[in-house]
Amino acid sequence: MRNLFRLGVLGSGKGSNFVAIADAIAAGKIPAEVAIVLSDVADAGILTHARDRKIPAQFVPPGKFRTKLDEEAERAFVEQLQAAKVDLIVLAGFMRVLKGDFLRAFEGRIVNVHPSLLPSFPGLAAWKQALDQGVKVTGCTVHFVDAGVDSGAIIGQQTVPVLDHDTAESLHQRIHAVEHELYPKCVAAIARGEISVQGRRVIWKK
Ligand code: GAR
């Protein structure tokens, strides 16, 4: 039997993107399996969603920093992901920046979803940044992860209009909805070997 493409999912929050990907796998839309889910937050919803689906899920203490993993935590994440033999790391609302050893261990094999049309509004609360800036169109981006903040090669983007009556919550909700369409499509294309990377450009072969 052919070995399925194995995903390692990392998240810090409620895990709706993980659910969208797990549902797409269950519906036969992504030729992959989620091998493991890890979180830096002990009571993160993403861990509960994974356990509900009988997927191995674990809290890994992030260590002494607020915005990145410390060395010991980084090692613990890498060890767990290597032991689970993952082919691709899928960041789904993982709110820490990944650094050196982690990136080297999985070079070119880490993807992230971000709630804006990058390179606009990298960093935190991108939907709020969009509202504050007064843009009329925002959206979401799926991209490879490199050493910068939300700066790697762009795999896919989907737009969302900013409406006059939008609040931070209503805009984030509509961005979330398009993330749930775009992220599974991008992960499916990677799992099928349908994309190639040429410098900053990601080419879809189909
Ligand atoms: C998503 O909107 C994702 O784009 C964002 O966190 C949310 C996680 O939601 N990620 C970032 O801002 C990363 N810079 P979820 O836990 O329901 O998937």
Image (cartoon, rainbow, N blue to C red):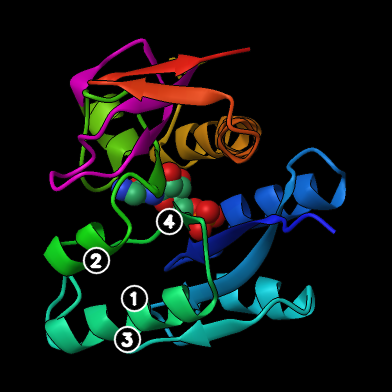
**Res. 111 image quadrant:** top left
User: Within 10 angstroms of label 4, few (less than 14), some, or many (20 or more) residues?
Assistant: many
Labels 1 & 2 near each other (Cβ < 8 A): yes
The residues bearing labels 3 and 1 have C-alpha atoms spaced at a distance of 6 Å
What residue span does the magenta drawing correspond to? 133-158
In this figure, which residue is indicated by the disc labeled 3?
76
In this figure, which residue is indicated by the disc labeled 1?
78
Q: Is residue 98 left or right of residue 202?
A: left
Residue at 84% x, 52% y is 26
Q: Is mark 3 within 8 Å of ligand 1?
A: no
In this figure, which residue is indicated by the disc labeled 2?
102
Labels 3 & 1 near each other (Cβ < 8 A): yes
Camera-side mark, 4 or 3: 3
Q: Tell me the element at label 4.
A: loop
Q: Is mark 1 within 8 Å of ligand 1?
A: no
Q: Name the residue nearer the viewer: 89 or 13.
A: 89
- Residue 189 on image: x %, y %: 61, 30
User: Within 10 angstroms of label 1, few (less than 14), some, or many (20 or more) residues?
Assistant: some
Q: Name the residue nearer the viewer: 24 or 168.
A: 24
Q: Tell me the element at label 2.
A: helix
Q: Is 30 drawn above or below residue 8 in the view shown?
A: above
Q: Is mark 2 within 8 Å of ligand 1?
A: no
Residue at 32% x, 44% y is 108
> Does the magenta portion include 157?
yes
- The first of marks 1 and 4 along the sequence is 1
Q: Which amino acid type corresponds to the residue marked 1 in the rendered image?
A: Val
Q: Is 26 drawn above or below residue 163 in the view shown?
A: below
In this figure, which residue is indicated by the disc labeled 4?
93
Quarter that holds the C terminus: top right
